[in-house]
């Protein structure tokens, strides 16, 4: 099984919305399929996000469903993650980012280390996962995907984005004016959406 993040146009190609993608978990070889439109405040995506864990690609699943394939899909190579129990609906956030080419491995490790430390400092983060993009399997502009689940939107927009750990330890990797920081390209996809149930499930 491979976990994928796919970007979908907000309404697909009429008459399709995100519902067929969301329901694809009933297909053989698909263990998780969750899709929904991105919420206001998202940027850099395509309008909707589809999370898939399957034995085949999102494009192949879309073809089987007879719906348009994603505008972009990346296969994920897990670095580390954790599933935290949370009942009912939640907000799933995905950050797709690109580390600048030629960045020393030690600096990349520092970025990953600071991202992985966030759940210990920010209780609003429930389940989470940090992955590298399998760029050999899915050639992509992105190098990393950082995902979290929250009980509500405020957990992301207030507790997470406004937390001192975020703007003192993590923001520096995105700020080109900070010495030793600024290793992340300015173009990001910060997308979040609602989900009826768990998305980040331990395999």
Image: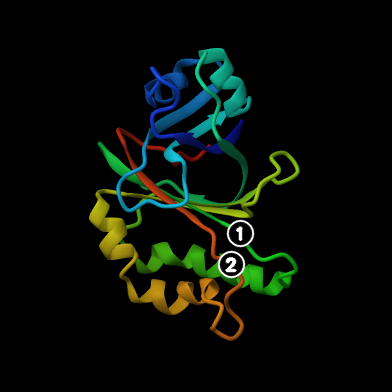
Which element type, helix, strand or loop, lies under badge 1? loop
Q: Position of residue 29 (x, y in %)?
A: 57, 20
Front residue of 50/177: it is 177
For residue 66, above or below residue 34: above
Can I make out residue 11 in this image? yes
Q: Which mark is residue 184?
A: 2
Q: Position of residue 15 (x, y in %)?
A: 38, 17
Can I make out residue 29 in this image? no
**Which image quadrant: the N terminus?**
top right
Q: Position of residue 46 (x, y in %)?
A: 46, 41
Which element type, helix, strand or loop, lies under badge 2? loop
Q: Do the CB atoms of the residues marked 2 and 1 lie less than 8 Å apart?
A: yes
**Residue drawn at 72 percent across, 39 percent down:** 137
Q: Position of residue 188 (x, y in %)?
A: 51, 57
For residue 198, above or below residue 95: above
Mark 2, Cα crowd under 10 Å, few <14 / some 14-19 / many 20+, is: many
Front residue of 157/185: it is 185
Q: Which mark is residue 98?
A: 1
State left or right for residue 143 relative to residue 175: right
**Residue drawn at 65 percent across, 74 percent down:** 107
């Amino acid at each position: 099984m491979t976990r994928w993040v796919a970007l979908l146009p907000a309404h697909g190609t009429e008459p399709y919305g995100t519902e067929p993608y969301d329901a694809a978990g009933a297909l053989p070889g698909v263990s998780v399929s969750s899709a929904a439109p991105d919420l206001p405040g998202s940027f850099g995506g395509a309008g909707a996000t589809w999370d898939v864990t399957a034995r085949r690609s999102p494009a192949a699943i879309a073809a089987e469903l007879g719906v348009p394939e994603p505008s972009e899909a990346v296969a994920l190579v897990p670095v580390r993650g954790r599933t935290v129990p949370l009942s009912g609906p939640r907000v799933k956030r995905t950050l797709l980012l690109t580390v600048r080419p030629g960045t020393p491995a030690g600096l990349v490790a520092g970025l990953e280390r600071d991202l992985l430390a966030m759940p210990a400092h920010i209780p609003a983060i429930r389940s989470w996962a940090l992955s590298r993009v399998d760029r050999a399997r899915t050639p992509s502009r992105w190098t990393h995907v950082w995902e979290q689940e929250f009980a509500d939107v405020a957990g992301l927009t207030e507790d997470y984005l406004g937390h001192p750990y975020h703007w003192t330890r993590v923001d520096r990797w995105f700020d080109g004016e900070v010495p030793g920081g600024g290793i992340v390209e300015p173009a990001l996809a910060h997308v979040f959406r609602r989900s009826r149930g768990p998305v980040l499930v331990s395999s």
